[in-house]
Image: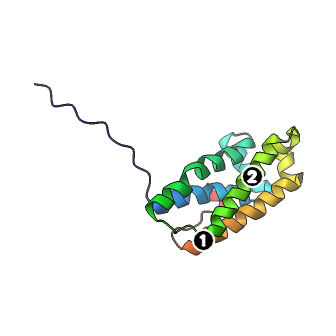
Amino acid sequence: MNPAPQPPTRYTMPDVPTSVLRLAETLVMLAASADEQVAWLARHRWHTDELALDFDWANGWVPHNVDDQSPGLLPPALHDLLQRIDDALAAMSDDPAPETWTPEGLTTDPEWAELRHLAAQALTEIEALDLIAIPSPADL
């Protein structure tokens, strides 16, 4: 006799600390020095645009998931910084200068310096939540 069919398992979103950690990990790499970013990209054999894609992936679901599970936990300042980072990355993606998306661009392009600054501010906001330990770039 065949067992009764089971309903499909429903995907559940990670808990709040895990979600915030995923976002923090992407911000750690955006805030890292150019040398740390270049080393991270080489270690993973990724292209420079993976820094943006990784953030886009996390920013696309983490704030919504956390806001659904713990309304009001993420401060407005963090939401604002995430939007500013997203806007800056979008502007860089629209820029036809391909050197922006090279290891050399990470070290010389002032837009990357501004992104590092914004990401560091966002990490400060996350750290103030006291939910997770912020990893170092070497841990990623």
Q: Position of residue 72 (x, y in %)?
A: 52, 68
Residue type at mark 1 is: Glu
Residue pictured at 70% horizontal, 47% vertical: 52
- Depth check: give the residue in front, 4 or 36: 4
Residue at image location 54% in from the left, 60% down from the top: 21
Q: Tell me the quadrant of the picture where the C terminus can be found.
A: bottom right
Element on which disc 2 rests? helix
In this figure, which colouring scheme has been used for the structure? rainbow
Q: Nearer the viewer, residue 120 or 84?
A: 84
Q: Earlier in the sequence, mark 2 or mark 1?
A: 2
Label 2 amino acid? Asp
Q: Are marks 2 and 1 in contact (CB under 8 Å)?
A: no
Q: Residues within 10 Å of mark 1 (few under 14, many from 20)?
A: some
| Residue 50 visible, this orientation | yes
Identify the residue at image location x=60%, y=60%. Answer: 24
User: Quarter of the image holding residue 20?
Assistant: bottom right
C-alpha span from label 2 to label 1: 23 Å
The residue located at (67%, 44%) in the rendering is 53
Query: Which disc, if any, is residue 52?
Result: none
Q: Position of residue 38 (x, y in %)?
A: 76, 49
Which quarter of the rendered picture does the N terminus lie within? top left
Left or right placement of residue 67 versus residue 107 in this view: left
Mark yes or no: residue 102 visible: no
Name the residue beneath numbered marker 1.
127
Looking at the image, which is closer to me, 138 or 91? 91
73 or 44: which is nearer to us?
Answer: 73
Residue that mark 2 sits on: 87
Query: Secondary structure beneath disc 1?
Result: helix
Residue 93 vertical position relative to residue 132 in the rendered view, above or below: above
